[in-house]
Amino acid sequence: MIVDTEMLRMGAAFSDSAGAIAKRGAAQLAATSMPAGMFGDFEAAESFLGALRRTHEAQLTSMQTHHRGLSALAEKADLGAKHFSNQDDASESDLHSAGRAIG
């Protein structure tokens, strides 16, 4: 089996970067507020504001979830690359030892 550990590390870095962007976006979104009456002081305006607030909260939750998922993916890819590299190093050492024992 051939594993491109550099590609794994590159994917991990990309996922980590995307997770950081999602985290910053979530922080900015969380810092925004929608004051009562911003669309007017009548029933349809309040109803719209309520729908907008629910959507705002759902988007915030989604961005936080994306951050966690992307960060976890980056961590797993880094760990996988590390394990494959360590295994390759150990196998190379074993092959050299076996070659010296034979030769």
Image: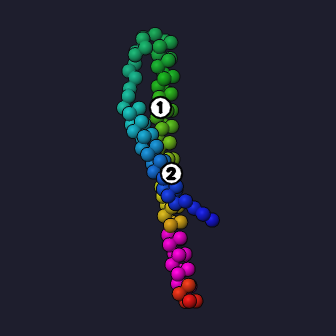
Three-letter residue code for mark 1: Glu
Q: Which residue is mark 1?
A: 57
Q: Quadrant of the C terminus?
A: bottom right
In this rendering, the label closer to the viewer, 2 or 1: 2
Q: Nearer the viewer, residue 92 or 40?
A: 92
**Residue at 48%, 64% in the rendered image:** 82
- Magenta includes 100? no
- Residue occupying image coordinates x 48% and y 53%: 10
- The image's mark for residue 11 is 2
SS at mark 2?
A: helix
Q: Amino acid at mark 2?
A: Gly
**100 versus 48 height, above or below:** below
Mark 2 or mark 1, which has the lower sequence index?
A: 2
State whether residue 77 appears in this view: no
Is residue 91 shown in magenta? yes
| Residue 98 image position (x, y, % from top left) | 56, 85
Question: Which residues, given as a range, are shown in magenta?
Answer: 86-98
Find numbered disc 1 in the image and state the secondary structure of the residue it sits on: helix
Near-viewer residue (17 or 38): 17
* Percent coordinates x, y for residue 91 in the rendering: 55, 75
In the image, 46 versus 11, the foreground residue is 11
**Is 82 rendered above or below residue 16?**
below
Task: Say whether residue 99 is visible.
Answer: yes
Alpha carbons under labels 2 and 1: distance apart? 30 Å
> Is the stretch drawn in magenta largely helix, strand or loop?
helix
Q: Answer above or below: position of 103 versus 55.
A: below
Residue 48 vertical position relative to residue 65 in the rendered view, above or below: above
Please rate how many residues cluster around mark 1, counting C-alpha atoms within 10 Å: few if below 14, some from 14 to 19, many from 20: some
Image point (46%, 10%), residue name: 42
Question: Residue 84's mark?
Answer: none
